[in-house]
Image (tube, grey):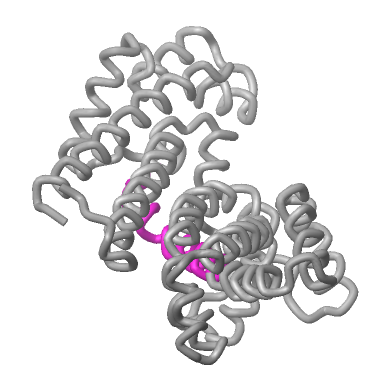
Amino acid sequence: MSLGWLTRRVALALLAAFGVSVLVFALIRLVPGDVVTNLIGLEGNVSAAQQAEMRRLFGLDQPIPVQFGHWFASLLRGDLGVSLRTDRSVFGDLLLRFPVTLELTVVALVIAVLIGLPLGVTAALNRGKAADFVSSSFVLIGLAAPEFWLAILLILLFSLTLRWFPPNGFETWAESPIGNLRSVFLPGLALSLGLAAAVTRIVRASLLDVLGQDFVRTARAKGLPERIVIYRHAMRNALIPVVTVVGLQVGNLLGGAVIIEQLFGLPGVGRYALEGINLRDYPVVQGAVLWIAVSFVLVNVVVDVLYGLIDRRVVYS
């Protein structure tokens, strides 16, 4: 892996982040209404002059290109602006909320791998048998079922019926490690099932392809135990597509956390962005979406680096 390749990859990542910033800035302003109309709806009748003054104070009276120029100039200095509703730093709020979203994503990722990897291996080793049918059924359900629907079912079963987990709310690790895990496990499970289905499918397909290659037949002909052939030789070569899927799906987990965090009352970046959309708080929406987009792009860079570590045949120049 060359330094030139890494530099180009990071430059493309920054370019993608800039494109996202432009797109989000434009799209949020296409939504009818703004923060002023939202405030007026809560506080009663306000004259046209007062509305104009409020828009001037918020900087909404300026042309859109000028507003973008001010926001992007601040962005280059590492300033995401302040919330129009709370006057709090958007960057500061994101730093407080991102650990919640990150923990939820990590929990969902771990659950997905723990479910998908064994299921995929079992399906590949039992092709055409009952285990393969069960695995394929899980894949179909996991990919087809919406996350919010699964989340509601999990709440009904594990929270309201069995009372094993709280239906909403969040406890920090400092408050209670057990309470923290209980508050993120159920939303993490709801968020993980789609990824678990995708991992199961790609592990099965990749492992079946590798098991038919010459080096596997050679390893078996040498008399190596089947366990060594599968897990030391075949799995290492079958992992690259899995890493690709998992890496790309991390961004989807971050985006899917918007609905899950709202359903379970978790104070993460997704819920923060949704509140900003509802309140037409432009800096909040722009900052939260850009934060998630940059995280997604960085994950893709890490995935590309992992290619070279898993398979030495992969060379970047």
Q: Which residues are magenta?
A: 87-109
Residue 315 in the image: above or below residue 185: above
Residue 258 in the image: x percent, y percent?
58, 48
Principal SS element in the magenta part? helix
258 with respect to 297 (left or right): right
254 with respect to 18 (left or right): right
**Which residue is rendered at x = 51% and y = 16% of the image?**
30
122 with respect to 61 (left or right): right
Residue 12 in the image: x percent, y percent?
24, 36
Residue 111 in the image: x percent, y percent?
60, 72
Q: For the view shown, which residue lies furthest in the right direction?
A: 161
Q: Nearer the viewer, residue 303 or 209?
A: 209
**Which residue is rendered at x = 46% and y = 8% of the image?**
49
**Which residue is rendered at x = 39% and y = 42% of the image?**
293
Residue 235 is inside the magenta segment:
no
Residue 83 in the image: above or below residue 302: above
Q: Nearer the viewer, residue 304 or 297?
A: 304
179 with respect to 85 (left or right): right
Residue 312 in the image: x percent, y percent?
26, 65
**Which residue is rendered at x = 77% and y = 62% of the image?**
138
Question: Could you say which quadrant of the image residue 165 lies in?
Answer: bottom right
